[in-house]
Image (cartoon, rainbow, N blue to C red):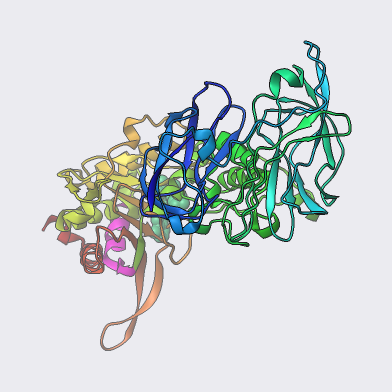
Amino acid sequence: MSIQDIKVPDIGGDEKVEVIEVCVSPGDSVEADDSLVVLESDKASMEVPAPLAGKIVTVKLRVGDKVGTGDQVLTLEVLEASGESTESKDEEPSAVTAISAEEPPAKNESPVDNKSVLESIAVPDIGGAENVDVIEVCVSTGDAVAEGESLIVLESDKASMDIPAPFTGVVESIALKEGDKVSKDSTILVLRLDKPVATLQAKQSEANSIVEADRAVSSTVEEASDHGTVTSVAEIKASTSTAGNSRDDGHVYAGPAVRKLARELGVDLSTVNGTGPRSRILSDDVKGFVKQSLTSENTSSGSGVPTIADVDFSQFGSIEAEAMSKIGRLTAENMHRNWLNVPHVTQFDDANVDELEDFRQSLKAEAKNRDTKLTPLPFILLACAKALADNPKFNSSLQRNGEELVYKHYINIGIAVDTPVGLVVPVVKDVNKKTLWQLAEETAVLAEKAKNRKLSMKDMQGSCFTISSLGSIGGTGFTPIVNSPEVGILGVSKLAVKPVWNGYEFLPTKMLPLALSYDHRVINGADAGRFMTSLTATLADFRRVVL
Ligand code: CAO
């Protein structure tokens, strides 16, 4: 058993590259050729594989570190029994790491001049495999490719592997397509190089390929094409990821080009489903993932609730579209926010307003003299003020942290007013301190201002509770939405004469349908029951308002 320092191999040049993935942790057992770290330059990404089987002792790098040739990656405890030769600590990194390789012999090099030259790139030695499927062509004609970027991906029944560009250049033409079968020396494409090979070939580009379970294909490649140019792939590296599992041991089954694309787009590859053979993640999978993310963002509300798809109604008949008013849009937004944030419960009751209605009718002449109108609303306002005073939780608001209730020592009540441009809620201040006549006048003024769009911001602020009265319109009941941060809202429907049992007989009685919606985070059912009982008691016997 010996401890080996594993270093960054020759990655070509003095440039430092970023560590984008650390694939192992101390204590992990690795097989020869398992990926240890993934590095990424602005040209390509590359994996540093384990040169030998062993156990990770320490990891010297972290994601985000910048490293260059010879920097230490980790220390590996190597089992002599593996039969592998081991290197001493001080050996050159290129000898240790699988992704660096011997210099390829440059056969039939292109002329050494400064003009751009065409290089035919052929399939390197792929471990003796023949008639291997091309499962992905990663480039198109005209693409600029950097040395090390994937050109094609091959898949045999034993392994899949990326074939990287041996040089930086522009794709002049492509000689194969997905589904073709290739062997060593099959032409992949023609690359236009800025510089002749002789000045480039000294640097060997590493290959990165991922293969199925426990198959390690490794071969050093140096070859000349028919045109006499050099194609070289340092080593085709195999990982031990299990076939069909793109995330074995947290590893992602994707080539360097796909990894680079994912990095550029900010995609976490471990969340992408691979649709390639054996769940390999293809560039189209990454693009599809981004597209889907963008689409789902556009089709969901802020709370992640899917929205309802637009329908082309014109297919069913004539239509007309009208822009929503600003008030309408704001109301929609507020209603949606309140509906989603507030757990609503609505409690129903009918108030016996027989006597109240007699009283109100008796005041009609006086109201006329005062040049006002006495509807049920001012009575309901005063009865609510009394119920709020008796049940202060209804006059509170829950702080956003959910840990504090704020009790208000004033009683301001909003009244929902229906206007041609939408719903507005002016606020009657200090309701409990006002007389019926004051409330009658004030509600009439506020309603008028609302309908004429004359309300100021001040008119609409500071509400503790809201009344929404549809009594003049109709209906037997509805469930109003709490106007958060208030915790309660009273819906008033049209009073109706109903038969009420008095213990001896049914008597025709004027009953006012009430619906109390409340925020169940703050108000319990019993609280609501008490509030409603106070309210109906006051409306049934209005003298109680002064108690
Ligand atoms: N049952 C029976 N009749 C009622 C009643 C009730 N609950 N409430 C009011 N009425 C009667 C009034 O007494 C009045 O009749 P008279 O003139 O014979 O007395 C008539 O209906 C019209 O009243 P009003 O609407 O002019 O006055 P109001 O004080 O009752 O209401 C206001 C004022 C501003 C609340 C009302 O005009 C309004 O806009 N209501 C709609 C509120 C709304 O849209 N709520 C829904 C919000 S959620 O979408």
Residue 534 placed where, x, y %? Answer: 20, 64
List the single residue furthest toward the bottom: 504
Vertical position of residue 447 compared to residue 318: above or below: above
List the single residue furthest toward the top: 114
Which residue is found at the position 52% from the left and 22% from the top?
15
Q: Nearer the viewer, residue 338 or 8?
A: 8
Residue 458 placed where, x, y %? Answer: 32, 31
On the picture, is 200 further left or further right than 486? right
On the picture, is 107 further left or further right than 450? right
On the picture, is 311 further left or further right than 142? left
Question: Magenta residues, as a range?
Answer: 348-364
Which residue is found at the position 49% from the left and 34% from the top?
93
Residue 517 placed where, x, y %? Answer: 34, 60
Residue 369 appears in the picture as rendered: no
Q: Is residue 195 magenta?
A: no
Vertical position of residue 175 compared to residue 398: above or below: above
Which residue is found at the position 36% from the left and 39% from the top?
426
Residue 206 placed where, x, y %? Answer: 63, 36
Vertical position of residue 510 compared to residue 120: above or below: below
Q: Is residue 362 magenta?
A: yes
